[in-house]
Image: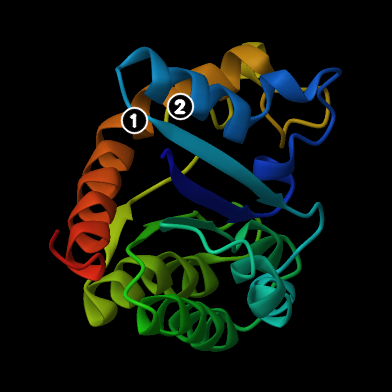
Amino acid sequence: MPLRILALGDSLTAGYGLADLKDSFPAQLERALVAKGHAVTVLPGGVSGDTTTGGLNRLEWSLAAQPDAVIVELGANDGLRAIDPKLTADNLRALVRRIRRDGTPVLLTGMLAPPNLGRDYDDRFNAVFPTVAKETGVLFYPFFLDGVAANPALNQEDHLHPTPAGVAIIVARILPMVEQLLAQAEKAAREKSPPP
């Protein structure tokens, strides 16, 4: 039976602006994992415009799918709206702890603040993600848009959302960390199922 990974996120996960959702992050990630021999289904849980507050508000509904692991990709819209980094941290902490309560492993992805909000905000916002990951002991991928951000060739005309080629780079770079997440999920599944 394939393991189920929930990709809980915002427009970067939802595939905003892409002509075909086969090019979205969940779909490309699933294909990449299957190509490496993993029996896995990636559940799309992206809602465009979602903040960490929105993600927390819909978490119980999202977890009804009973995923074996969760990738949390939220926070970009908090930065775009200059939301207090303390609220972002509180929301992410609550999200991760709720998911972990069921013994479900988590991969938290980081985000960087937009460059126009000043050094103080940047420092506070950028520290949220590694801090929450360290406090909760979950896997951490420092910057979801690594290798893609600010590259016009890999982003749509809004300069915020990746093209299909940009998504492919995100998937390639995050793949080793997702394989670690899968290993944790496989271990958790073995521990949950009684011996024969």
Which image quarter: residue 117?
bottom right
Q: Is residue 60 left or right of residue 33?
A: right
Where does residue 43 sit, x and y in percent of width and height? Answer: 61, 45
Above or below, comparing residue 67 to residue 81 in the picture: above
Query: How many numbered marks, from 0 up?
Result: 2
Above or below, comparing residue 188 to residue 185 in the picture: below
Where does residue 118 sit, x and y in percent of width and height? Answer: 57, 66
Q: Is residue 122 left or right of residue 134?
A: right
Q: Is residue 57 left or right of residue 6?
A: right
In the image, 140 versus 77, the foreground residue is 140
Residue found farthest to the front: 196
Q: Secondary structure at mark 1?
A: helix
Which residue is painted at 58% across and 20% down in the image?
166
In the image, 94 versus 80, the foreground residue is 94
Where does residue 182 sit, x and y in percent of width and height? Answer: 29, 45
Quarter placement of the C terminus = bottom left
Residue found farthest to the left: 195
Which residue is painted at 51% across and 79% down in the image?
95
Above or below, comparing residue 174 to residue 127 in the picture: above
* Mark 1 neighbour density, 10 Å: few (under 14) some (14–19) many (20 or more): some
Q: Which residue is mark 1?
A: 175
Q: Do callouts 2 and 1 mark residues in contact (Cβ within 8 Å)?
A: yes
Q: Secondary structure at mark 2?
A: helix
Q: Which mark is residue 60?
A: none
Quarter placement of the N terminus = top left
Where does residue 157 sit, x and y in percent of width and height? Answer: 83, 23
Q: Which mark is residue 171?
A: 2
Alpha-carbon span between mark 2 and mark 1: 6 Å
Which residue is painted at 30% across and 17% down in the image?
36
* Mark 2 neighbour density, 10 Å: few (under 14) some (14–19) many (20 or more): many
